[in-house]
Image (cartoon, coloured by chain):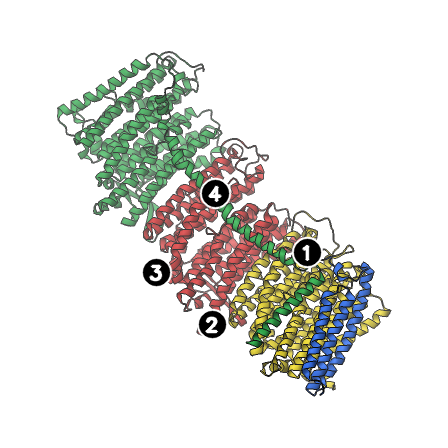
Chain colours: A green, B red, C blue, D yellow
Amino acid sequence: MDILLTLILLLPLAGGVINACFGKRLPRPVPVFIACGSVIGSFLAALGSFTLATGDGYRLVLFTWLKSGHFQADVGLLFDPLAAIMTLMVTGVASLIHLYAAGYMEEDTDQVRFFTLLNLFVFAMLTIVLADNLLLLFLGWEGVGFCSYGLIGFWYRKTENADAGRKAFIVTRIGDLFFAVALLWLFALFGTISIEGINAQVAGLDMTTVTLLSLLLLVGACGKSAQLPLMSWLPDAMAGPTPVSALIHAATMVTAGVYLLCRMFPLVSLSPTAMAAIALVGIATALYAATCALAQNEIKRVLAYSTMSQVGYMFLAVGLGSVSAAMFHLITHAFFKALLFMAAGCVINLAGHENDIRRMGGMRQRSPLVFWLFIAGLLCLAGAPLTSGFFSKDLILATAFARGDIFHQGLYALGVMTALLTSFYCFRLAYLVFGGDYRGDELPHEPNGLMVWPLLPLALLGLGAGLLNLPHLFAGGSWLSAWLGREQDVLHLAIATEYLLIGTAVAVFVLGWLLAALRYRQYVQRPASLSGDFLLNGWRADDLFDLLLVRPFKKIGRFCSQGVEIGLIEGVLGGTVRGCNDLGMRLRGLGAGKVSLYLQGLVWGFVVIVGWFLLRALI
Amino acid sequence: MAIDFPLLSLLLFMPLAGALVCLVLGMGNSTAPRWVALLTAAGVFVVSLLLCLLQTPTAGWLFYEDYRWIEQFGVRYTLGLDGLSSVLILLTAFLQLLAVLVSWRQERAPGVFFALLLVLEMAAIGVLLALDLILFYLFWELMLIPMFFLIGVWGYQRRFQAAVKFFLYTLIGSLCLLLAVISLYLLHGDQTGTYTFALEALKQTELSTTQELIFFFCFMAAFVVKVPLFPFHSWLPDAHAEGPAAGSVDLAGLLLKTGVYGMIRFAFPLFPVAAQKTLPVLAGLALVGLFYAAWVAYQQVDIKRIVAFSSISHMGFVILGLAAWNQTAWEGSLLLMVNHAITTAGLFVVVAMIEQRTGSRSLDQLGGLWKSHPNMSAFFLLFCMASLGLPGLANFAGEILILIGVFTVKPLWAVIAVGGILFSATYTLRLVQGTLWGNNCEPHDKQDLHSREWLVLIPLAVLVVALGCYPQPVLDLLREPLSALLLVGGMP
Amino acid sequence: MIVPLEHLLILATLLFAMGLGCVLVRRNLIMILIGVEIMINAVGLVLIGASAFWQQVDGQIMVLILMAITAAEVAIGLALVVYLHQQKKSIDVGIFDEMRG
Amino acid sequence: MNQESLQSLLPQILLALGSTAILLGGAWVRNRRLWLLVGALVAIVAALVAAFVEPPQIDILGMYSASAYARFCTVLWSLTVAATLVISCRYVDIFRFGGGEYASLMLFAAAGMSLLSAATSFVGLFLGLEVLTLALYILIAFRHGDTRGAEAGMKYLVFGAVATAFLAFAIALIYTATGTFNLQAAAVGLQAGDGLRPLGLAGWALLLVAVGFKISLVPFHLWTPDVYQGAPAPVSGLLATAAKGAVLAAFLPLLVMSGEGIADIKAILWLLAIATMLVGTFAALPQTNIKRMLAYSSVVHMGYLMIALIVAGADGSRALLFYLVVYSLATFGAFGIITTFADENGEIQDYDDLRGLAALHPRRSALLAVFLLSLTGIPPLAGFFAKFGLFQAAFRGGYAELAVIGVIASVISVYYYVRPVIALYAPESASVCRDVAARSETLLLVGCAAVIVILGVYPTPLLSLVALIIP
């Protein structure tokens, strides 16, 4: 069993390393096989070892990474239900994405680098999932950062792609710093960094410490999960190839934050303040992203914002204290968002590598299959009744509602509001892309089989994943909550309320659809409105950050290098040297070759000496 | 335990012999010296590896040699080797081997060039072995001469200024050291009646606090300049920018290390009280330097200068760890020092290769190298990632240990220092972006890595990963000596 | 002795000072040499006086040695004067400032 | 004047006779090399005699002493002269010197120096000094038809003459004050608080001026660079090393004693030392002519030696002797290199002419680098231990401030010492192409460098020798 567990982690790593070292020398298709094979292999391994994950889970220490004084960091795996379900999801979705990528990147000359990074990414992500201590988790945490840097900037010849990659790296790293501080502090407090160890001891802490720690973790999570205020990297990250977007934004990286919070839930949940903060961040991001999504013109950017918004829901769930709700939505979202992104990739191909939805339309005729797949995804996203998205989102909102107090009522209201916007932009997207007839002029570019058929299982999962945690109302057993051992997350509401909530959800969905239908059924060229522009640029957040962070950073840098380094330090040195030289010049200038002057020097010396002696003789 | 056969002297004089042979052969043909140098460096490496393997993690000296030398001054020829020195010596030998390979195609006066390299190696090893202050000082100064000529003769345009700057800076520091040593020696002599420069004996000198502080400052003047610690760093970028590739490798790999070594082997144990008093100042300078250097690096255009400033920034990290004064932090510092040496060496090597191929070192003219030289770029990326502290690669291991060690003592320092990780990301990514990505550079030499360059880069890369994932062997060697030194420092 | 030592010393000092003055103000090499001669003669005077004062002969021996040496010096000096005159057609020390700094 | 005293003076007599003999012989046989080598031989013999022939009596007529110290000095100067003669072989040919005259004058100077450092009375001292100076007058202007040489000779002459006058007057006054020519007695007599003391003090003032001129202390140093630049390189070498060393050696025993009068003199010396170290250092910085640079460097080193002179005592004296030897080796070597670089169109002095010479003459360039770095005092060259001993002595003697100033000076000195070295190793070669050095020259210089390196690594032998001489 240990072997299997190790293989989950090892296979993608091996695949990545092999491709990195020898990929160039291998004949063309082989690296792809290695990449896909390794990931699928690790998926199978995950399936195989799934049974291990019961109760408190299964610990496996491979070797000691760092040991110094009291500090010890093992490379150890903690395979508990949470990790197990996450592992399955990651490996599963990743496998499909790899297959899709195999098709998508077929002609790309730089395939090997792509798959190397993809594999390493999966490895890093799995490290996050399986790590049994925070330092190892941090390794994965930074690892995904690096891989996404490499993948987003994959087409590096275009500078803006590289810039996007850099932005992603740095912005997420800002979050990482807080995480790191939390890590240090936790070690200082408990003398250990093992997740179990920490969670076991948190009870004793005083409230402020807990709150601060939780907030630090929250900011860390925000960085990776593109929550306010560290969200600005996500839309730009669309510069990367579509499979990357799928992998980073659907399945894995963005959900890492949520996962971290769930991992550290025993700690986080201790502080109501922190919980409220998490919930607020979540809902705020959800709303913010939804509004931005309304105005986006690039299909992938719409999806990116939608992701942000959905992850916001997950944070909300965590903030509400319902891990299972968060995980539930995380998983369903992974399915349908991966589906959406990859379908979007097909659409883009169909539109002849055109990203702009204003220049699409009529895609339905071009490929009905893709159309249906995409719609399936959209329905889930918009929360159409009985789709997985419906159930997961509903659970979150219901939980919020169930809390009853005004604060949570407010959260609920905002959540519903967001849901409305979501279904609105979903159908806006649907109409603009598929409705009407084609507005662009590129020739269609048929997506090959490898790009289409991995979507089918995802579509099925997306539509059906609701079963994972079907509420009692629908005669479900809330399996996921049970599996995660969090029965307390299961809601027991009055039937009436349940129906009320579901009613609102459906109503909101329909309302959004109708509005979208009214507005976008027939495509009309609209002049860019000020508000639209504002939303399009994500509330001008980038300009804000530029003003607050980037410019001052550069200013200080210039001050240091110009002012201090060259001006002060070099100036002082140069001044000293020049001073010495001038003095030297003046000294050598004495006499100037004239004997008479030399003699005067001699006499002056004589006078001084005699003067001294007279002085001594007199006194 | 002591062994009769003078292994240490062998280790010490092997390079010297090699250097002499190089000089002699250098008169004639131009290919012989490099082979001699290579063989010598390899020999030294083997011996030092042997010494490391022979290590049993004990606090005492594994090897110890002590002979009469200059009775009139009470100077003795005393060498000692423990885990600490052996790690650094191994590092030195390894990097020197690479330095020889890097400068394989040295056309101008190869005999002298390689001789200087070997002398430099000898001096560095001597510094790491010497236990008699004058002997130590001798080697300490001896390091200057070869480095000075390497920069001043085989350097670039402004080499004279750079060389002299380097020379003066370091000389001022070390002459302060000399004065302190002499007066300490006299003080001890007047107290005990035996005039000696032996480290162990001088530790027993009774000093008033003010005396200690003065001596400590004089000692630190030498070491701090070598490290270099902000604001005494301004010789380093010039030296790197103007020096040849091998020179940069040695600067980053050998010279900088000796500064830190001097602190923990001499300055701290000799003057524990003063050290304790001044730790906050040290930490403050380290922190300032950490960010300052990062900021300056971010503004640079010359990639070699970027790397130079990055290494200043990293040394700030190291010093911070020392200032924390506890086991974890010190182990971290030493580990980071080793790792940083390897990473930076790698960076400089690749930078030299880039310059060979493109004839430029300016970010404005470089870019898109991945297209033409994927392998070289891959290595560069690896080293850059290591240098920005990506977990699993070399530098991170040291940095995290330092941070943890510091946090347990002074949380605030650690929290500030964490910011340094972000800063290193900013300039490193700028460096990567300016060289590898984009497409505004047409290198005149299309040839990707050739065999010798593979030979240089692969070991470095392997080490970068290995030390990142499993630094335990190094840490085990360091543990005992460091804890012993910490105890001398007189703090739990 | 008839003349008191003080007077002699004063006279000698004056002589010496004059000689020095001559050396300082004159730019003609020969004049400078003459100035030096005057200074040395002052020395001789002092020595004589001193040996009289201490009732010793050493001083007078010294004077003889001094004379001999001075003679040699002057000989060389004049030779050099001739040589210089060949070189620059002048013995004004002021014009010999080819090397400076 | 009995036979013992003649025996005791044997080395000096050998030198004097040798020089006259060569002078005579030179009239008939006009073979330069021959006479140079003969001269060198004589000098070496004299040195050997001084070293190994035990003199029957130490005190010679109360004028000179044949003490170990004096004999050590004799050995030193004779060897220096011998080396200078050997190094001059090619030089003398190039500039068509009268071989006989050159050699005999050198020997004459040697005799003067050894008498000077052996003197125990003012008479002997004066005699020795004058013998030396007279020889130097001629040697400096020895290059016929060279205006700079003539100018240098003139300048040296004027100053020499004035200094002689000062010295003579000083001696006269001290004699008047103390009634003895014996150095020790005179210095002791200085203590006596009788009415004549002011006279004695005045005498000492004049004496200091004379000495200051001879060993070119600031502010009496102004002639130095000009003379060194104008004089033939080997002669400059002699001027910088033995000529100064002899004077210092002569006055060392005086200051070893302590007392009120000496204290006053030390105060003056203290001032002079500081002025000399600093002024010399800074004046050397902007030099672009290696001979002038070396002149200023010699000024600075005299400043260092002043430290030892002030510290006095056994420590100081030993440090001084050790330093003197090491300094002489290095300086002689440097001037020797310049000598070997000379050819028909003159010596190379400007750094611009030195550029890239290393490519043509790797050996000599390396040697020059060694010599200059030794002067800088960088280990592992002898200069380091010389400075080390000096500063250590200063600390012990309670003159830490002098040591610190010395350190500062030597830091700055790095700049002017390495400039020519870097010029030598410049990639682009200067147009001037020099012919190769004679084997004898190379051997000699390599020998110097070797000694410097060995003493830098293992100074014990010389240290113990010095300790032997100064108990």
Towards the viewer: B157 or A234: B157
Contact check, label 3 and label 4, Cβ < 8 Å: no
**Mark 3 vs mark 4: which is more N-terminal?**
4
Towards the viewer: B141 or B334: B141
Q: Pointer 1 indicates a residue of which chain?
A: D
What number is the disc on residue B491? 3
Residue D327 appears in the picture as rendered = yes
- Per the image, the residue denoted by label 2 is B189
Q: Give the quarter of the figure containing the N terminus of chain B.
A: bottom left
- Amino acid carrying label 4: it is Ala
Q: Pointer 2 indicates a residue of which chain?
A: B
- Amino acid carrying label 1: it is Asn
Q: Is residue A319 above or below residue A200?
A: above
Q: Are marks 1 and 3 on the same chain?
A: no
- Per the image, the residue denoted by label 1 is D289
The picture quadrant where one finds residue D125 is bottom right
Q: Is residue B54 above or below residue B208?
A: above
- Amino acid carrying label 3: it is Met
Q: Pointer 3 indicates a residue of which chain?
A: B
Residue A580 image position (x, y, % from top left): 58, 55
Under tag 4, what secondary structure?
Answer: helix
Nearest-to-viewer mark from 1 and 4: 1
- Per the image, the residue denoted by label 4 is B297
Measure the alpha-carbon separation of dots 4 and 2: 48 Å
Measure the alpha-carbon separation of dots 1 and 2: 45 Å
**Mark 3 vs mark 2: which is more N-terminal?**
2
Under tag 2, what secondary structure?
Answer: helix
What number is the disc on residue A417? none
Mark 4 Cα shell of 10 Å, populated few (<14), some (14-19), many (≥20)? many
In the picture, measured across the screen, residue C41 lies left or right of residue B149, that is: right
Measure the alpha-carbon separation of dots 1 and 4: 40 Å
